[in-house]
Amino acid sequence: MNPHIHANARRDRLRAKLAQDGVDAYLISGVANVTYLTGFKGEASHLVVSKNKDILVSDARFTEQIKNECPGLEAIIRPPTKKTLDMVAEAIRSIKALSIGFECQVLTVSDFESLKELLPECSWLATRERVETQRMVKEPIEIEAIRAAIQMAQDAFVSLNKSLMPSQTEKNVADELERLMRSMGAQCAAFPIIVAAGLNAALPHAIPSQHCIGNESLLLVDWGASSPSGYKSDLTRVLDTHNFSKTSGQVESKDKLRKIYSVVQKAQKAAFDAIKPGVKALDVDRAARQLIAEAGFGEYFGHGLGHGIGLQIHEAPWLRPGSETVLEPGMVFTLEPGIYLPGWGGVRIEDNILVTSSGAQYLTGISRELDDNIIA
Ligand code: ZN
Ligand code: ZN
């Protein structure tokens, strides 16, 4: 499978939107958007897409990489004496584009002001999510890349669980998990890994500390791999470490963990069952949120239900209240309901889901049962 053929077809799909927006060209500045449309994995570059011609504007760090990753694509390489925006202006002038759609959620105000000065003859249209909506529905080659990123993350997690020691700190565990993912083929972790023991798990985005995991009766791990192709996975599991820890009052705490875990698990299942093409993202969020609220924990689920994954760890579609996105086959996103109780801890269960023609499919395969996640 030749990746640049995919990139050409993706640019053609974007090109088809020029007429709708009534512009001569798009200026694409989002790093993941440029990668998606060209196959180029570097950064700090812009892509001009017009009716007849596409031009990648980059700098000399990437000359060779661009030749390898984007054969056939015209590139303007900035010399050290020039600014990138000067070259962007040159690219736009060379194709005689007079109206430009730019990515208003990406381009900085400062860069926009400079471009207006450099190109006084041009008119500018602020556009939103022209490429992001394309990226939202994954091609088979992308789904395979996400599956690979999931496999690396899962294999690393299974291996990690065999070697956990009560004396390890949250930070030790996070470091070890990243090392394992890299050894299983990951380029790096998809985001800073969260390892939170006991009370710290009440913070949905806890930073791994020097706190020993053996002092607590639950351990929340939120991790994912970035595959060599740049696609990402994102999972969360809670481990029952009662038999592992030295704390007292474990029976009460164990029952509480079972109860809360079961609510979160049912919420995720309710969301999963609500997924099918044509359903709005907000309805899937609501299915989980309602179940948690009915169990009496509504105020302790303070974040959205899920987010798309792909070249970025957080991307469209967004599953949260108010999200009008209509689900389509090929969308890949997380389902990650959680309950966070200050002074106790938290439970989140996060899996990666593919929307199919008739419903949904779990891409993640490691057990979501608490009984299978007991560390002794
Ligand atoms: Zn996560
Ligand atoms: Zn997530």
Image (cartoon, rainbow, N blue to C red):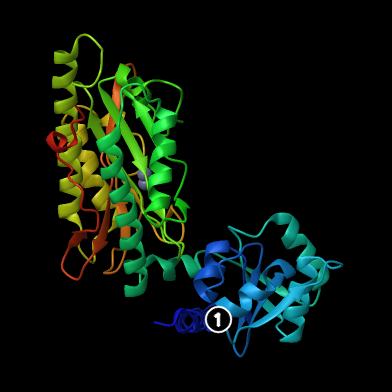
Task: Tell me the crowding category of disc 1: few under 14, some 14 to 19, or many 20 or more residues within 10 angstroms, Cα based.
Answer: some
Spot occupied by residue 65 in the image (x, y as percentages of width and height): 62, 73
Spot occupied by residue 195 in the image (x, y as percentages of width and height): 38, 33
**Residue 18 appears in view:** yes
Quadrant of the rendering where the N terminus is positioned: bottom left
Spot occupied by residue 194 in the image (x, y as percentages of width and height): 40, 36
- Residue 18 in which image quadrant: bottom right
Residue lying at 26% horizontally and 34% vertically, measured from the top left = 238
Q: Which residue is mark 1?
A: 18
Total label count?
Answer: 1
What's the amino acid at mark 1?
Answer: Leu
- Residue 268 in which image quadrant: top left
Spot occupied by residue 339 in the image (x, y as percentages of width and height): 27, 31
Residue lying at 31% horizontally and 22% vertically, measured from the top left = 166
Quadrant of the rendering where the C terminus is positioned: top left
Q: Nearer the viewer, residue 66 or 329?
A: 66
Q: Secondary structure at mark 1?
A: helix
Q: Is the residue 318 above or below the residue 28 in the image?
A: above
Q: Is mark 1 within 8 Å of ligand 2?
A: no
Q: Is residue 245 left or right of residue 178?
A: left
